[in-house]
Protein backbone atom coordinates (compact mmCIF):
# COMPACT_ATOMS: atom_id res chain seq x y z
CA UNK A 1 0.00 0.00 0.00
CA UNK A 2 1.36 3.42 -0.92
CA UNK A 3 1.54 6.47 1.32
CA UNK A 4 -1.48 8.18 -0.21
CA UNK A 5 -3.51 4.95 -0.28
CA UNK A 6 -2.80 4.44 3.40
CA UNK A 7 -3.87 7.94 4.40
CA UNK A 8 -6.99 7.74 2.22
CA UNK A 9 -7.89 4.35 3.70
CA UNK A 10 -7.45 5.55 7.28
CA UNK A 11 -9.65 8.59 6.71
CA UNK A 12 -12.21 6.50 4.80
CA UNK A 13 -12.34 3.99 7.66
CA UNK A 14 -12.39 6.87 10.17
CA UNK A 15 -14.06 4.91 12.97
CA UNK A 16 -13.98 1.36 11.58
CA UNK A 17 -12.58 -0.89 14.29
CA UNK A 18 -13.32 -4.15 12.43
CA UNK A 19 -11.10 -5.87 9.94
CA UNK A 20 -7.35 -5.67 9.53
CA UNK A 21 -4.70 -3.13 8.58
CA UNK A 22 -1.50 -4.09 6.82
CA UNK A 23 1.92 -3.14 8.09
CA UNK A 24 2.28 -0.47 5.41
CA UNK A 25 -1.13 1.04 6.10
CA UNK A 26 -0.38 1.38 9.81
CA UNK A 27 3.17 2.70 9.57
CA UNK A 28 2.42 5.16 6.76
CA UNK A 29 -0.38 6.51 8.98
CA UNK A 30 2.00 6.83 11.94
CA UNK A 31 4.56 8.66 9.78
CA UNK A 32 1.89 10.99 8.38
CA UNK A 33 0.56 11.96 11.81
CA UNK A 34 3.99 12.50 13.36
CA UNK A 35 5.39 14.58 10.50
CA UNK A 36 2.22 16.64 10.10
CA UNK A 37 2.04 17.30 13.84
CA UNK A 38 5.66 18.44 13.88
CA UNK A 39 5.17 20.73 10.88
CA UNK A 40 1.97 22.24 12.27
CA UNK A 41 3.64 22.67 15.65
CA UNK A 42 6.28 24.88 14.04
CA UNK A 43 3.57 27.28 12.88
CA UNK A 44 1.00 27.02 15.65
CA UNK A 45 0.45 24.86 18.71
CA UNK A 46 -3.29 25.32 18.28
CA UNK A 47 -3.20 23.88 14.73
CA UNK A 48 -1.12 20.96 15.93
CA UNK A 49 -3.62 20.28 18.73
CA UNK A 50 -6.59 20.45 16.33
CA UNK A 51 -4.87 18.03 13.95
CA UNK A 52 -4.13 15.66 16.85
CA UNK A 53 -7.78 15.71 17.89
CA UNK A 54 -8.95 15.19 14.30
CA UNK A 55 -6.69 12.15 13.86
CA UNK A 56 -7.22 10.60 17.29
CA UNK A 57 -10.15 8.34 16.35
CA UNK A 58 -8.67 7.11 13.05
CA UNK A 59 -5.38 6.49 14.85
CA UNK A 60 -7.09 4.32 17.44
CA UNK A 61 -9.06 2.56 14.69
CA UNK A 62 -6.03 1.75 12.52
CA UNK A 63 -4.15 0.50 15.59
CA UNK A 64 -7.07 -1.80 16.46
CA UNK A 65 -7.11 -3.11 12.88
CA UNK A 66 -3.31 -3.59 12.99
CA UNK A 67 -3.63 -5.61 16.22
CA UNK A 68 -6.39 -7.65 14.56
CA UNK A 69 -3.97 -8.44 11.74
CA UNK A 70 -1.66 -10.00 14.33
CA UNK A 71 -4.64 -11.94 15.77
CA UNK A 72 -4.91 -9.80 18.91
CA UNK A 73 -7.76 -7.81 20.35
CA UNK A 74 -7.87 -4.10 19.61
CA UNK A 75 -8.47 -3.51 23.31
CA UNK A 76 -4.82 -4.36 23.94
CA UNK A 77 -3.90 -0.86 22.83
CA UNK A 78 -5.01 0.25 26.29
CA UNK A 79 -1.59 -1.04 27.36
CA UNK A 80 -0.29 2.33 26.16
CA UNK A 81 -1.50 3.58 29.56
CA UNK A 82 1.24 1.48 31.18
CA UNK A 83 4.42 3.55 30.84
CA UNK A 84 7.33 2.14 28.87
CA UNK A 85 6.46 -1.59 29.10
CA UNK A 86 3.02 -1.08 27.54
CA UNK A 87 4.48 1.09 24.79
CA UNK A 88 7.18 -1.43 23.98
CA UNK A 89 4.69 -4.31 23.83
CA UNK A 90 2.39 -2.35 21.55
CA UNK A 91 5.22 -1.43 19.18
CA UNK A 92 6.47 -5.02 19.05
CA UNK A 93 2.98 -6.31 18.25
CA UNK A 94 2.44 -3.67 15.58
CA UNK A 95 5.63 -4.62 13.70
CA UNK A 96 4.78 -8.32 13.57
CA UNK A 97 3.60 -10.01 10.39
CA UNK A 98 0.08 -11.22 9.82
CA UNK A 99 -0.86 -14.25 11.93
CA UNK A 100 -2.62 -17.16 10.25
CA UNK A 101 -5.17 -18.50 11.03
CA UNK A 102 -6.72 -15.22 12.05
CA UNK A 103 -10.08 -14.92 13.84
CA UNK A 104 -10.45 -11.22 12.98
CA UNK A 105 -9.82 -11.04 9.26
CA UNK A 106 -9.73 -14.45 7.66
CA UNK A 107 -12.40 -13.43 5.10
CA UNK A 108 -10.72 -10.08 4.29
CA UNK A 109 -7.35 -11.58 3.39
CA UNK A 110 -7.35 -10.36 -0.24
CA UNK A 111 -8.47 -6.84 0.76
CA UNK A 112 -5.68 -6.34 3.31
CA UNK A 113 -2.90 -7.59 1.06
CA UNK A 114 -4.00 -5.48 -1.92
Image (cartoon, rainbow, N blue to C red):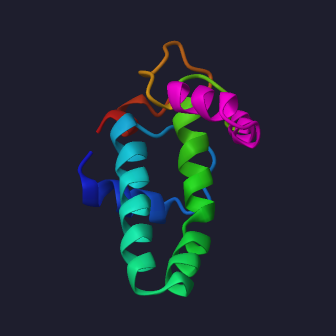
Residue 20 pos. (x, y %): 51, 37
- Left or right: 51, with 3 as reference point: right
Residue 104 or residue 76, whichever sits in front: 76
Residue 99 or residue 26, whichever sits in front: 26
Residue at point 58% right, 29% down? 88
Q: Quadrant of the N terminus?
A: top left
- Left or right: 98, with 75 as reference point: left
Residue 88 appears in the rendering? yes
- Left or right: 25, with 45 as reference point: left
Q: Is residue 87 magenta?
A: yes
Magenta span covers which residues?
75-93
Residue 103 pos. (x, y %): 62, 22
Q: Is residue 19 magenta?
A: no
Residue 12 pos. (x, y %): 46, 64
Q: Identify the main secondary structure in magenta.
A: helix
Residue 77 or residue 2, whichever sits in front: 77
Residue 5, placed above or below residue 112:
below
Residue at point 43% right, 62% down? 33
Residue at point 29% right, 56% down? 5
Query: Across the whole image, how many numbered discs are drawn on residues?
Result: 0
Residue 106 appears in the rendering? no
Q: Quadrant of the C terminus?
A: top left
Amino acid sequence: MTFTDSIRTCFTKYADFKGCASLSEFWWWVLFTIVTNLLLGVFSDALSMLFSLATLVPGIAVTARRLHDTNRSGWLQLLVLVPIIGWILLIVWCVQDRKEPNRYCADAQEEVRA
